[in-house]
């Protein structure tokens, strides 16, 4: 799966995008976030407050209960406002 990080998530993780195999035991977005937090201080800081992180899977906004598949594109980004 392709995982994308935008804005301050990219800055904190030090990664803009990466290709990963769906980790064992990860079934949904919530599980993926928990797994990512365990990858180091930058990831833990980026996902410290899940309430301010938005996620899209295959370019559609989803909740953390969204089931993941190995070929998915998962994007994490901060809330966006516009006018």
Image: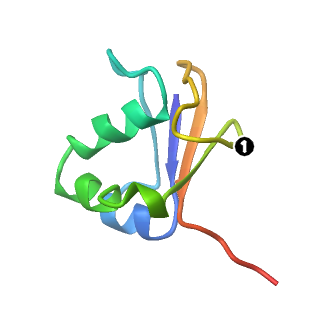
Return the x and y of residue 39 as percentages of the image width and height. Answer: 22, 42
Colour theme? rainbow
Return the x and y of residue 38 as percentages of the image width and height. Answer: 20, 41
The residue lying at 33 percent from left, 16 percent from top is: 25
Local packing at callout 1 (Cα closer than 10 Å; few below 14, some 14-19, many 20+) is few
Tell me the quadrant of the picture where the C terminus can be found: bottom right
Residue toward you, 66 or 45: 66
Residue 27's place in the image compared with 32, above or below, is: above
Residue lying farthest to the left in this orientation: 41
Quadrant of residue 34 within the rendered picture:
top left
The residue lying at 52 percent from left, 39 percent from top is: 64
Residue hosting label 1: 59
Quadrant of residue 71 within the rendered picture:
top right
The residue lying at 38 percent from left, 22 percent from top is: 26
Quadrant of residue 73 within the rendered picture:
top right
Left or right: residue 31 versus residue 78 is left
Residue toward you, 43 or 53: 53
The residue lying at 37 percent from left, 41 percent from top is: 33
Left or right: residue 29 versus residue 23 is right
Q: At numbered mark 1, what does the secondary structure look like: helix, strand or loop?
A: loop
Return the x and y of residue 43 as percentages of the image width and height. Answer: 28, 53
């Amino acid at each position: 799966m392709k995982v994308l990080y935008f804005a301050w998530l990219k800055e904190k993780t030090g990664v803009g995008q990466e290709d990963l195999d769906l980790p064992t035991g990860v079934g949904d977005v919530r599980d993926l976030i928990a797994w990512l937090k365990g990858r180091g201080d930058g990831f833990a800081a980026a996902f410290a407050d899940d309430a301010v992180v938005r996620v899209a899977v295959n370019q559609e906004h989803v909740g953390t209960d969204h089931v993941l598949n190995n070929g998915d594109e998962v994007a994490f980004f901060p809330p966006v406002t516009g006018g």
